[in-house]
């Protein structure tokens, strides 16, 4: 067991009972002060985590992976949320032009090898952005099902601590938080997109489908890879 796993287990035991606002404050202001970043997709539920972070410190670093394949609505929503919450340290990271020229010169790798596409456009970009941090925060939740069903609030990945403060939130609490805070909704939410990723690989969710069933529809893929070993 690597050191980060041991540390994550101890932090989960010590702080895992805390609700999201309290957990975030302890991690941002105490345990990982100056050594923590938020990673946000600026997707349909992203505003909640970012609002909680802004309450604590609006200058907390936030990383957005600009894959070059996002919906225009997502980019506009990112800018709106940054302005609304007065976030001052949002950094957009993009894939290497050299890698794209070599492996995806026509921009259609997503249709031929989606795993490699995600690796080039998301995984590598994020790993570089995380290089200066020992802890990162995600908006993942157990209700997203799949590999996330047993998600803990604190775990580890590739030698870093990963905080999932909203792990135990349900849809009712998410909706209530949006309403009470009057947070802007992602424009695609009104078009039945429950989870939004890159444009070519995301479709609206159909009635009766799971939260992430509109992602990589029709292929055996459920995660982009940034949360996988």
Image (spheres, helix red, strand yellow):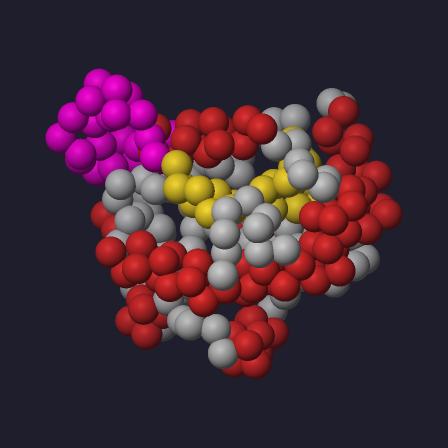
Nearest to the observer: residue 185 or residue 80: 80
Q: Is residue 133 left or right of residue 224?
A: right
Highlighted range, magenta: 94-119
Q: Quadrant of the C terminus?
A: top right
Q: Residue at x 66, y 32 (%)?
A: 134
Magenta residues: mostly which secondary structure?
helix
**Residue 90 location, x and y as percent?**
46, 47
Query: Which residue: 39% across, 36% down?
Result: 93
Residue 143 found in image quarter = bottom right
Q: Is residue 171 magenta?
A: no
Q: Which quarter of the figure has residue 91?
A: top left
Question: Residue 142, percent across and down?
Answer: 60, 57
Q: How many marks?
A: 0
Q: Quadrant of the N terminus?
A: top right
Image quadrant in which you'd find residue 115: top left
Task: Indicate whether 65 appears above or below 150.
Answer: above
Vertical relation: 172 (above or below) 95:
below
Residue 69 at least partly seen: yes
Q: Position of residue 81 (x, y in %)?
A: 43, 62
Residue drawn at 37 percent across, 63 percent down = 80
């Amino acid at each position: 067991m690597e050191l980060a796993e041991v540390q994550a287990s101890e932090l989960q035991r010590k702080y895992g009972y805390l609700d999201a606002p309290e957990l975030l404050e302890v991690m941002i202001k105490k345990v990982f002060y100056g050594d923590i970043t938020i990673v946000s997709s600026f997707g349909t539920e992203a505003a909640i985590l970012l609002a909680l972070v802004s309450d604590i410190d609006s200058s907390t670093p936030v990383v957005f992976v600009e894959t070059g394949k996002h919906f225009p609505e997502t980019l506009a929503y990112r800018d709106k949320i940054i302005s609304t919450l007065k976030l001052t340290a949002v950094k957009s990271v993009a894939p290497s032009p050299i890698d794209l020229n070599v492996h995806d010169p026509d921009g259609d790798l997503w249709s031929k090898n989606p795993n490699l596409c995600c690796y080039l456009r998301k995984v590598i970009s994020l790993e570089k952005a995380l290089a200066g941090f020992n802890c990162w925060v995600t908006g993942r939740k157990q209700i997203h099902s799949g590999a996330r069903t047993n998600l803990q609030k604190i775990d580890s990945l590739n030698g870093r601590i990963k905080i999932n403060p909203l792990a135990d939130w349900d849809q009712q609490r998410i909706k209530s938080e949006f309403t009470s805070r009057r947070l802007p909704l992602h424009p695609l939410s009104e078009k039945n997109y429950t989870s939004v990723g890159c444009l070519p690989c995301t479709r609206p969710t159909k009635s009766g489908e799971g939260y992430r069933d509109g992602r990589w529809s029709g292929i055996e893929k459920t995660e982009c890879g940034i949360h996988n070993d």
